[in-house]
Image: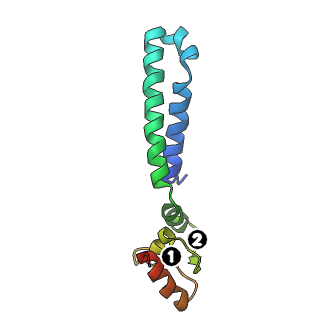
Amino acid sequence: MNLTLGQKISMALVLLTVFGGATAQLTPILGAYASTTIATIASLLASIVSGWMFIITGQGNMVRDVAAMPGVTRVAVNEQASQALAQVATDPNQPKVGAISPEVRETLNATAKGS
């Protein structure tokens, strides 16, 4: 199974969230102090990782992930692209992502630069 970075982080968030809210379930197993400590640490880590998730799951990274999937030949981008998407579409390191036409490529170049 090929998991993206976003999927791996989401799986970690699920685990941290479960432990963050599992004080009542952990208390009989580990005791009050240990279960509260685990829940507190898990809750703090979930908050931090959620922030990271927000950053790495931007539009540009999603398109890169899709382009890297087996079975995807090309991701065609039109002139309505956001700056993040235009930057991916004009990146020479992303050969499977590009403009739908040469005219649109000029528009994407300007959008990517923030013009």
Vertical arrangement, residue 110 with respect to residue 46, above or below: below
Q: Which mark is residue 34?
A: none
Q: Position of residue 95 (x, y in %)?
A: 46, 77
Q: Are marks 2 and 1 in contact (CB under 8 Å)?
A: yes
Q: Position of residue 87 (x, y in %)?
A: 45, 73
Vertical arrangement, residue 104 with respect to residue 69, above or below: below
Residue at horizontal 43 percent and vertical 10 percent from the top:
33
Residue at horizontal 56 percent and vertical 24 percent from the top:
21
Estimate how packed mark 2 is, as few (under 14), some (14 to 19) or many (20 or more) residues with alpha carbons within 10 Å: few
Q: Dot 1: what SS?
A: loop
Front residue of 43/113: it is 113
Q: Tag 1 or tag 2, which sits nearer the N-term? A: 2
Q: Position of residue 26 (x, y in %)?
A: 53, 15
Q: Residue furthest front?
A: 115
**Residue position for label 2:** 72
Q: Is residue 34 visible?
A: yes
Q: Which mark is residue 96?
A: 1
Estimate how packed mark 1 is, as few (under 14), some (14 to 19) or many (20 or more) residues with alpha carbons within 10 Å: some
